[in-house]
Image: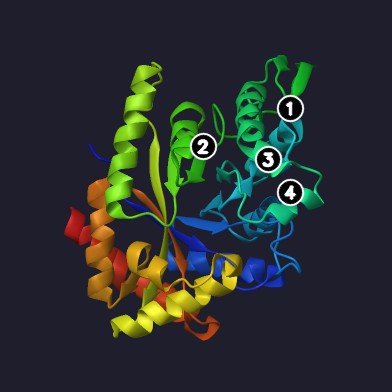
């Protein structure tokens, strides 16, 4: 039996609006809320936050909705520190944390600001995840890596979720696919076509099989940028403007929108999202890509029109 579809979206507004935004998303009926992080996005930096403190505020304002870091930048964390931070949040939220992770790299200046070598981010992340998973067991951990060394380290208490909060690995490239297959509990790509998603599912299953890793409980997630307007061109322009402001170093986003984003009328969005579901996605976290004044309308159309029609079309 296929797992049911689940849906989420990102928190809206600034940090001071975290609690009210979280209550709004839970009240609308979303399964997940998410927030990301950067330490210095650009120079001069655009406003950014750190994900786990924001999710902690959201946890205190809600009771049911799951909390997803979209995404936490693993290279910036020591595994012992990350184990304690995530365990504390998971226990405080009664087991609602999903740890969405990535390695970053699109803003090298933030690595320089933290004294990190951006070229080492992949290996640092893999070592951190290996050590993190070991620490979550509660056993004394001895770990000898290039970047991290642990000598008889253990944590107490353990996470509320057992064996631990699920790790969703974000990314787009083969290194991220392999990381998900070997060190993750879910796959969480972004700026991805349905064809790429289907191919990545096949690759992850093959890698896991080759390494004798059981991924029967694996989560197949997708981070979807969406722009809902009756006119397709209006939707594309709104998405390009929103994403260009967020990822300004990446240049014009119109081509990216046309290749990877979900946009247009409700019907067009449902049709496109169905392609992702058919490719294997089961947990879809939306990032509404529109002007601030249209965000609430997008959320209401998602829960009132898009999601019900998508469920009906994929049953």
In the rendered structure, the answer to whether residue 85 lies left or right of residue 28 reads: right
Is residue 281 visible in the rendered structure shown here? no
Work out whether residue 283 or residue 58 is closer to the camera in this orientation and state it.
283
Q: Is residue 215 visible?
A: yes
Residue at which label 3 appears? 75
Q: Which of label 1 and label 2 is nearer to you? A: 1
Q: Which mark is residue 147?
A: 1
Q: Position of residue 254 (x, y in %)?
A: 41, 73
Question: In terms of sequence position, does the residue under pointer 1 or pointer 2 come before the other?
Answer: 1
Between 210 and 153, the residue placed more toward the observer is 210
- Image vertical order of residue 15 relative to residue 169, above or below: below
- Neighbours of disc 2 within 10 Å: few (<14), some (14-19), many (20+): some
Query: What residue does disc 2 label?
Result: 166
| Real-space Cα separation, disc 1 to disc 4, in angstroms | 15 Å
| Residue designated by label 4 | 111
Q: Secondary structure at mark 3?
A: helix
What whole-number distance in Å separates the C-alpha atoms at marks 2 and 4? 26 Å
Of the pair 79 and 105, the residue shown nearer to us: 105
């Amino acid at each position: 039996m296929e797992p049911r579809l689940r849906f989420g979206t990102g928190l809206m507004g600034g940090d001071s609006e975290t609690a009210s935004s979280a209550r709004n998303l839970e009240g609308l009926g979303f399964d997940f809320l998410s927030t990301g992080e950067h330490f210095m996005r650009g120079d001069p930096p655009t406003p950014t936050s750190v994900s786990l403190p924001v999710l902690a505020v959201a946890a205190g304002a809600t009771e049911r909705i799951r909390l997803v870091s979209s995404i936490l930048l693993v290279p910036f964390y020591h595994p012992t520190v990350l184990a304690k931070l995530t365990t504390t949040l998971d226990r405080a939220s009664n087991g609602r944390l999903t740890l969405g992770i990535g390695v970053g790299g699109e803003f090298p200046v933030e690595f320089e600001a933290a004294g990190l070598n951006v070229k080492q981010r992949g290996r640092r992340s893999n070592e951190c995840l290996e050590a993190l998973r070991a620490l979550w067991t509660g056993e004394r951990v001895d770990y000898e890596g290039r970047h991290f060394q642990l000598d008889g380290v253990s944590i107490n208490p353990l996470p509320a979720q057992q064996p631990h909060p699920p790790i969703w690995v974000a990314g787009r490239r083969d290194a991220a696919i392999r990381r998900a297959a070997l060190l993750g509990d879910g796959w969480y790509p972004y700026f991805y076509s349905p064809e790429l998603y289907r191919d990545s599912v096949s690759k992850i299953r093959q890698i896991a099989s080759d390494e004798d890793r059981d991924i029967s409980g694996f989560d197949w997630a997708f981070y979807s940028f969406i722009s809902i307007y009756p006119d397709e061109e209006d939707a594309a322009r709104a998405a390009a403007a929103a994403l260009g402001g967020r990822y300004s170093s990446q240049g014009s986003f119109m081509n990216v929108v046309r290749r990877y984003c979900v946009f247009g009328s409700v019907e067009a969005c449902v049709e496109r999202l169905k392609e992702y579901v058919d490719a294997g996605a089961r947990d879809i976290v939306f990032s509404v890509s529109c002007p601030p004044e249209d965000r609430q309308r997008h959320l209401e159309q998602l829960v009132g029109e898009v999601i019900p029609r998508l469920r009906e079309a994929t049953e």
